[in-house]
Image: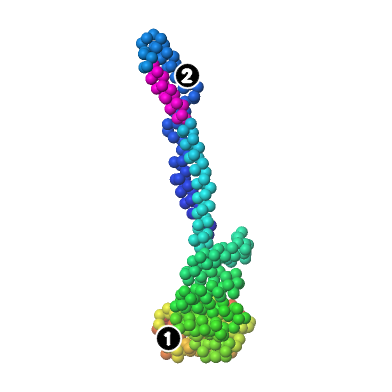
């Protein structure tokens, strides 16, 4: 935002300099024409005395003398008037320059506030920084800018992007009634934009105490009819299905959403937690002093698309010792994303316990053959070294492995 106003001020300064310079610069002939009036009068007196002397001497006729006096008088008036005219012209130019300097910048700012979009200069970091005290603008000033946008849209109502921006601004200010009204206008102008309807549904739910039924659900359904992969629509539809107790439907929505998200994103982690809870794990696994817990996800660009029945191994091994696992958990691809816990109950032998280690490497592998031994074509991921007792391990299966040697 600061950069925009700096550039605008620089452009205005260049424009004003181009306009004012011709008005304020001194005319080149001013020094010649500004001869003092007393000196002019003395010169013409001498010329008049010479005419009178010629008349008395008879070298100049009375008629010619009279003509010469008239010509001399006209020249005196012309020369004496030049500085006055130049001075008046210079004063007029100065007044015009002052008027331009006062009016043009103000007119430009008022025109921008009326026809432009001041709110567009704000981004999310500006809004968050207000709460941290890092900017001098107050919430009241932000609301003022939002109200300016609302005024502009009142005069130019056929602008769906403007209404959408106004609705998001009202939402950020928690003015949900105003946000719903703005979203309604945006949706009416752009009825085929799925994301608009999803945002509208979210605001309608806020006005209904968080309920996604009724008008909110109508907008969710229309959003997904327009775009079956609309992320916000899928998230809201899954939450609504879970609220109604339709767990299987909620899982279908969340599974579709999860495939659209980056596997290492916070949103993906939340969706994974929802899936784990919907599938029967009502509580996320919590690591104890002798265990390790975390979440396992599959990257969309892992190299191949595994089948839902392929085997998933999650295991822990020592950092520097043998590669034989200390603890192994076996699941299938259809269980992904998977929240897991490794502990001594999953040990391969009683003598080698996970709880006896300080740090371990946690690995995961998808095997098409179901063989515990690594083979070419397996998909793998790992994390670590990880301290025993860690509860937030994140493993993303994202690479093709090689055969065991």
Count neighbours of disc 2 (C-alpha within 10 A) and say few if under 14, some if 14 to 19, many if 20 or more: few
The disc placed on residue 42 is: 2
Residue name at image x 43 percent, y 22 percent = 73
Furthest residue in direction front, as rendered? 63
The residue indicated by pointer 1 is 306
Magenta stretch containing residue 189, yes or no?
no
First to last magenta residue range:
65-83
Circle 1: element type = loop
Q: Main secondary structure of the magenta part?
A: helix
The disc placed on residue 18 is: none
Answer with mark 2 or mark 1, whichever residue precedes in sequence. Answer: 2
> Can residue 330 be seen at all in this image of the molecule?
no
- The part of the image, by quadrant, that contains residue 139 is bottom right
Nearest the viewer among 98 and 322 is 98
**264 with respect to 50 (left or right):** right
Circle 2: element type = helix
Magenta stretch containing residue 70, yes or no?
yes
Nearest the viewer among 66 and 22 is 66
Quadrant of the snapshot with the C terminus: bottom left
**398 with respect to 350 (left or right):** left
Classify 321 as above or below 40: below
Residue name at image x 50 percent, y 57 percent = 111
- Residue 87 position, x and y percent, is 49, 33
- Residue 330 position, x and y percent, is 51, 89
> Can residue 76 be seen at all in this image of the molecule?
yes
- Residue 241 position, x and y percent, is 54, 87
Nearest the viewer among 399 and 109 is 109
- The part of the image, by quadrant, that contains residue 318 is bottom right
- The part of the image, by quadrant, that contains residue 64 is top left
Mark 2–mark 1 CB contact (< 8 Å) = no
Residue name at image x 59 percent, y 63 percent = 144
Q: How many marks?
A: 2
């Amino acid at each position: 935002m600061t950069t925009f106003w700096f550039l605008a001020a620089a452009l205005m300064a260049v424009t004003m300099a181009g306009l004012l310079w011709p008005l304020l610069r001194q005319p080149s002939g001013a020094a010649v024409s500004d001869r003092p009036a007393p000196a002019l009068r003395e010169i013409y007196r001498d010329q008049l005395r010479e005419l009178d002397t010629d008349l008395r001497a008879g070298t100049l006729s009375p008629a010619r003398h009279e003509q010469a006096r008239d010509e001399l008088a006209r020249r005196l008036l012309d020369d004496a008037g030049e500085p006055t005219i130049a001075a008046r012209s210079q004063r007029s130019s100065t007044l015009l320059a002052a008027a331009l300097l006062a009016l043009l910048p103000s007119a430009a700012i008022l025109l921008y506030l009326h026809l432009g979009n001041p709110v567009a200069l704000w981004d999310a970091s500006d809004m968050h920084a207000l709460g941290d005290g890092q900017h001098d603008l107050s919430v009241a000033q932000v609301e003022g800018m939002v109200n300016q946008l609302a005024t502009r849209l009142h005069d130019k109502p056929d602008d769906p992007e403007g209404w959408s921006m106004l609705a998001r601004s009202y939402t950020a200010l928690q003015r949900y009634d105003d946000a719903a009204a703005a979203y309604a206008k945006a949706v009416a102008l752009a009825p085929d934009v799925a994301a608009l309807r999803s945002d509208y549904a979210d605001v309608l739910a806020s006005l209904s105490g968080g309920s996604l039924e009724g008008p909110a659900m109508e907008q969710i359904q229309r959003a997904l009819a327009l775009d079956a992969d609309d992320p916000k629509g899928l998230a809201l539809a899954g939450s609504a299905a879970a609220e109604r107790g339709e767990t299987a439907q909620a899982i279908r929505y969340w599974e579709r959403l999860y495939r659209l998200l980056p596997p290492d994103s916070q949103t993906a982690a939340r969706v994974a937690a929802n899936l784990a809870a919907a599938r029967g794990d009502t509580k996320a696994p919590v690591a104890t002093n002798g265990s390790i817990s975390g979440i396992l996800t599959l990257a969309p660009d892992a190299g191949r698309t595994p089948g839902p029945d392929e085997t998933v191994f999650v295991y822990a091994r020592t950092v520097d010792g043998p590669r034989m696992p200390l603890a192994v958990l076996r699941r299938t691809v259809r269980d992904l994303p998977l929240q897991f816990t490794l502990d001594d109950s999953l040990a391969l032998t009683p003598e080698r316990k996970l709880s006896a280690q300080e740090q371990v490497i946690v690995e995961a592998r998808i095997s098409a053959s179901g063989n515990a031994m690594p083979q070419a074509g397996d998909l793998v991921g790992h994390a670590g070294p990880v301290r025993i007792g860690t509860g937030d391990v994140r493993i993303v299966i994202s690479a093709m492995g090689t055969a065991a040697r």
